[in-house]
Structures are given as structure tokens and as C-alpha cells.
Amino acid sequence: MARIVMKFGGTSVADLERIHNVARHVKREVEAGNQVAVVVSAMAGKTNELVNWVQTMPKVAGAQAPFYDAREYDAVVASGEQVSSGLLAIALQAMGVDARSWQGWQVPVRTDNVHGAARILEIEGGDLVSRFEAGQVAVIAGFQGIGPDNRIATLGRGGSDTSAVAVAAAVKADRCDIYTDVDGVYTTDPRIEPKARRMKKIAFEEMLEMASLGAKVLQVRSVELAMVHNVRTFVRSSFDDPDAPGMSDPLNPPGTLICDEEEIVEQEVVTGIAYAKDEAQISLRRVSDRPGVSAAVFGPLADAHINVDMIVQNISEDGSRTDMTFTVPSADVDKALDQLEKQRQAIGFDVVQSESGLAKISVIGIGMRSHAGVAATAFKALAEKSINIKAITTSEIKISILIDGAYAELAVRTLHSVYGLDKT
Amino acid sequence: MARIVMKFGGTSVADLERIHNVARHVKREVEAGNQVAVVVSAMAGKTNELVNWVQTMPKVAGAQAPFYDAREYDAVVASGEQVSSGLLAIALQAMGVDARSWQGWQVPVRTDNVHGAARILEIEGGDLVSRFEAGQVAVIAGFQGIGPDNRIATLGRGGSDTSAVAVAAAVKADRCDIYTDVDGVYTTDPRIEPKARRMKKIAFEEMLEMASLGAKVLQVRSVELAMVHNVRTFVRSSFDDPDAPGMSDPLNPPGTLICDEEEIVEQEVVTGIAYAKDEAQISLRRVSDRPGVSAAVFGPLADAHINVDMIVQNISEDGSRTDMTFTVPSADVDKALDQLEKQRQAIGFDVVQSESGLAKISVIGIGMRSHAGVAATAFKALAEKSINIKAITTSEIKISILIDGAYAELAVRTLHSVYGLDKT
């Protein structure tokens, strides 16, 4: 017997047939003797429709600005999960499984007051647990909670993953199963490297560093939350036959378990290769090297909502002037340059240079903390393919390399191979 | 300055343009210095879609019976008003009107536990009133409340009218304006009698007796509630130009005011002619005249969900046997006869006769309580047209006459004219 939280996204509940399919997955776990809570998103397309209405309404009503009250946005948009949770409860009941729907305000999932992008503060799981223990499946509307103002608050797009992990933490679940349209986390993007393998396990920290690769699978916020509360989070496919053998086997189901590194017995040195295309590099030459200069550079960029990724600053030769390089999405490069020109006086730099069409390749693995030479292996492999490295940043478990975007796929395949990730 | 509750149905909020139109009506009342709460239905078609999903889900999930949990029905279906209330609040804000949405559970509108057809027990109007007084428009999701089980409860179809009247009672509103697709209550159906006139005022009791005629305009339950709490209920058109002159004039806006009879200074003897077609008559001949026989007849019919309308029983000549006549919808006549045959022994009757294709014509007016000869006038007028009267029932303020359905329109026009209703 285990206590499991199951999460299904919008495509998994897109119509009544798929909701029935979800109910079959749930029934299987109940019949395997588990206590089950289910977290659901809105039916696919529904959230977009509702968001579009909210965004269009002010204009239709003659407003000049497209502003709308985020509290009303939340009331409107949260209705999507209200529908899907009710329908799933009905489907389960029709299949003889005791179930009921729970809206965010009923659980209650208590959030802060940041409507539209709220954070969960606390989930009062007492009622849920007593229902569990009475054998009832809790179908919880994801993506929503209730704010201190007694109004519905949504967690922002993709927030249902976060709901699921938070519920799992609150009810001390043994596992949080995220059913999605991929069957797990891969060593790299299979569209680039067909030899990419599905990982059986990945540590929370690695999953966070997987960035673009991981974010397609799971919201970053939900991974952070899972790490903090040590919620074993299992990514699996909602397209698998619900009644195939072994689907409820806690030891060996198909998918990827995101867990504490201590649970990963045979830790690989490198576990995955991630990449991000369409990066642009901006370099400030001969910046005055004094306290507060970084803040002067990056403060205005943050205010302009420009997402800065890699930052490289070297120690200046003479202690007076230094070079500073950072990356932004290619689409934001003009806006960024504009901001920097405005601040030229305040920052004090000589020349600004930029280059678009770059790619960032990242090598990730907790094992590199205790293994020397991981970076050297990457540099050597790329050099053999004549790929020039423009910038390098490292963290304890990640090496990121900035290269010309044209070589992105080649670099991914080269690194995937050199660390032996294509070998089973 | 007045306190007004405004109610808009599904066709009035069918899309963003119409929601904007509703917002213009609301803004007009706010600018006229009134305190305003608005009750809205779901966008037209939305409730049907949601109900259809709920009803179809069990079958898709493989259930033999189409049963579903009424509590889940409520959660799913109430989402429709959640959307429209939020969008209207956004539209009002975009037009510079302070507003917020209120879900049934937020007000809260407390109901009993009869999910899917709940009754309002109490509305805690304190928060609403303090918002009113601060100048904020309350946009309330109609059709819903919260049950003692802390779950959403809907009031049954058409329940938004009831929500509006209940809110008006709770906040002691001066008037409850029901915006609908007709511009008021007519002396009879204008499709039958083009000379039908819109009434300026009608008493609560008369509105209830208008039955079929009135029910097209306003849910019967909401009229009952309005009568109990003496809520002045004003039926008006949502298609009128929101900014036409006089639209906020409390003395003379276009529409029909349903109010206490004391407010109707020049009470007409007869105020309206209602009709119901497709009635069938069933007569039991020589029923044993003893206590409990009516219960033996009508109990089984009620159990079979057959809606019995007129009931006529005459005093028996010799105290042992009597004739009993009643009407049912033509569609139910076979089912009713079937039930009666099953109970023949228990009831004890000789012969059962039935006739379909009849019509019930009703003459309604509070004034007839104090005027003699109202019924005689009707009988004489129908006789002059050679219309045979099959049965008669009367209440204090209504005379109902059963005739051959072929004469229904002629009878309506004749009675409408004989009581002078076609004269302005």
C-alpha cells in the first residue's frame, strides 16, 4: 500500500474519452491497494479560451489599455479545472470508484495574494487524508488555491504540476506521478540524438539544471518544491495502456523518477546534455571595475523584463577595467542594447559588442562534483570537431558552453557520445 | 439614490460584445447615483454544454445507468456563471466602474443540501452592503450557492432569477430589475392577440396565476420569493439601448413592475388572460365517495411524475358515488391511464374516460375578489362564440375554463376583448 498523488495535464483530459482513460489509470492504482489523490488541469484549449476572453474584454468594453484585474482573471480561468475535476469524479464513480472533486478553496490550498502567479503557502491536508483513509479518491482542481482575500488565486501557467507536488508534500505521499505526453526525461533531446536514452532516475538538482530540456517535461517551480519537500516525482506517459502489466509496480514502471541523489545508487558522472538555441551574447568592454557596477548593468535589464542567462566576468588585469559578457534571448538583444546605451554614463563602459544566433550547450551531472576532468573532456571533444567555444560558465554540477548556433546539434551529439550516454 | 439588483440572463451575456452592453446598463444605474448589485447567468449555450458533458460522462466511462453525483454536476455547471461574472467585472472596470465578482460560496449564498435543485436558506448580505456603500458594484454569479457540506449547490435551471430576488431581499433593495428578452408581462400572448398590452404593474399573486404566460418571463419560484419578501421586481428588456432617455427613471421606465397589490392604485378587475394547450382530461365515473379516495387517485400519479393540473370533483348526489375530472399534459395521458388501471381496485371506480387536445383558458385578476359577475361575463362571451365549456375551476383571483383546443385562440381573443384589456 502506498499513498500516491497522480497529476494529469490538459491533453490527458481533453475530452470525455480521455477523461475516461485517466479514470482507468486511477482505478488501476486504487485496485492495487493505494490511497490516491488526483490533480487535474483544465481540458486542453479551455485555459487558452478563457485567458483570451479575459484579455479581450477590456478592449471590447472600450478601454484604451489592455489591463484587467488579476483577481477576476483568476475567477474566470480557474473555472477550467473546476469542470475537469468534476467530470473525472463522475467518471470514477461510474466505474465504481468512490471519488469526489475538490476545488482549491475547498481543500483549502492557501496561497499568497499575487493573483495570476500565486505561490502556495500551505495546504491543509487533514480532510484529504481522512478521506484517503476511508478509501475515497480526491480529485483536486490543479493550478488554483485561495488567497488571504478569500478569492480564487491561480498559480500561473503550468501550475498544476506545482499543485500536485504541493499536495503530495502536504499528505506525505510516497510518490507524485506526473502523467504527461512524454514518457520520461531523456539524456538529451531525442529529436537531435536518436540514441538518447530515458533515465530511470535523476536527482532534483540535475533536473533543475536540465533547464530547457527538463522544462518541457515539468515546471521548474514544481521541481524546486519537490526538492525542498523531498517529494519523489515520477514522470510517465498518459498514453500508456492503463491496464498494461506492471503499470502499478512501484519498482519498475516506465518513466523517470526525480528523487534525492541518495536514492540514486549508481550515480553517473554526467547524466544529461541540455541545450538552448537562439541565444545572443552581449559584451561590455573595459567596464570600470568598482563595487555596484554589476547592479548598474543588470538592474535596468531586469526592470525591462529581459531574462539574462549566462554571466561571465573575468578578473581585471589591472584592477580598474574589466570585460563583462552575458547572454539574453536573441529576441531581446535590441531591447537590451537600448537599455545599456541609456545607462552608459552610469555603468561606465567603453565599447558594447553583441552577437546573435548562438547556442548554449550544458553538461549536467551530480557526479562531476567528485570527478575531475569532466570539463576537459568536453573541451577536447568539441575541439576535435573544430567547434569554437565563445564563453564558459560552470556550477558544481553543470558546465555551460556558448558556441555558434550552427554547431548546436553536432555539439549535443558529440558530448552525448563522449560521456557514454548513448550506451545502455 | 436607490439600491438596485440587476439580473441578466444567458442571452444577455452570450459573448463579449453583449457583456459590454450589460456593463453599459450597469454603468448607467451607477451614474444615476444608485447602489448596484448584478446577478448574471452563464453565457448562452454554456450551461447546456456543461450539463451535456455531465450527463454523457457516465456512459463514456462504461456505466450502464446514466446516474451521476449531483454534487459534481453542481461543481461543473456552476463554472459557467463563474466565467460570466468575472468577465462582467472586468468589463465594468474597463469602463471606469469599480466592481468585483462574487461566487455563491463567497457571498455566501447558503442553500440546503439538495444538490442540483437547492433552495436558498440565507444570504449573508453584510459584505455586499458595505461594498455597496463604498460605491463598488457587486457582480454575483447567479444560480448557485454553497450547501451545508461546503460544496457548490446550484438552484436548478432558471435559478438565476431566484438568486437575484434573494439577493434583493437580503440587501433590502428598492427594486430587482430582471433584464430579459421580452420587455414585460402582457395582458395575453401577443402572438395570439396582437392587441395585447404590456402591463405597467401586476400583483405578485396575479403573476403567479399567470402560469404559462408568466413562466416564460420569470421563474415561478422567484415570484414566490419576491412575494414573501415583498421585493419589487421589474421585468424589462436587455435589448433596449442602455443609454436611451429615461432608462434609469424609477417612475416610468419601460417594463412591467411585479409588486404588492397595494402599490397598484387603479386595480383592474381582470388583468390578464393565460392559456395552456395540449391538455388532456381524464374523468373517473362513479368513484366511491369515501375518505382517502383522492389520495388513492393522485398519489400514484405523483409517484409516476405526472403533473396534474385542474381537478374538479362534484358533490355526489346520494353520498356514495361521485365523478372526478382532472387534467394532465396530453403527452402523459397514456401513462396516467395505465397508473389508474393498476389502482382500479384500490380506488374503486366504474368507468374511466379521457380526451386529449384540450386547452385551458384562465382569466386572472385580483379585482375579481371584490367584483361579482366576472365569471358570468366569461361564460356568456364564450357561449356567444358557440365555444363549449367542458370544465370549470376557480380560485379567488382566477377562473380556469377547459375547452376544445381548436377554439383556444378564439377564446383568448374573445375574453381579452370582453374584459376591455385591448383598450389602452
Image (tube, coloured by chain):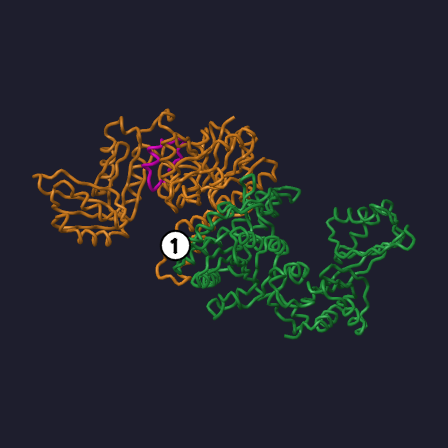
Chain colours: A orange, B green
Is B284 left, or right, of A348 in this rendering?
A: right
The number of numbered badges drawn on the structure is 1
Q: Amino acid at mark 1?
A: Tyr
Is A143 left, or right, of B198 in this rendering?
A: left
* Snapshot quadrant of residue A316: top left
The magenta-colored residue range is: A196-214
Q: Position of residue B377 (x, y in %)?
A: 77, 70
Choose between A413 and B210: the one closer to the eye. Answer: B210
- Rendered view: B79 above or below A256: below
Q: Which quadrant is home to the C terminus of chain B? A: bottom right
* Snapshot quadrant of residue B268: bottom right
Outermost residue toward the left in this view: A318
Q: Position of residue A305 (x, y in %)?
A: 28, 49
Q: Position of residue B52 (x, y in %)?
A: 59, 51
- Res. B94 visible in picture: yes
Choose between B57 and A166: the one closer to the eye. Answer: A166
- Res. A424 visible in picture: no
Is B126 left, or right, of A417 in this rendering?
A: right
* Snapshot quadrant of residue A196: top left
**Residue at (82, 63) in percent of width and height:** B390
Outermost residue toward the right in this view: B318
Crowd tier of the residue under label 1, counting other residues whose Cα lies within 10 Å: few below 14, some 14–19, many 20 or above: many
Q: Position of residue B233 (x, y in %)?
A: 57, 59
Label 1 sits on a secondary structure element that is loop
Residue B266 belongs to the span the image colors magenta: no
Residue A201 belongs to the span the image colors magenta: yes
Choose between B301 and B172: the one closer to the eye. Answer: B172
Chain of residue at mark 1: A
Instruction: Say which residue label 1 marks.
Output: A68
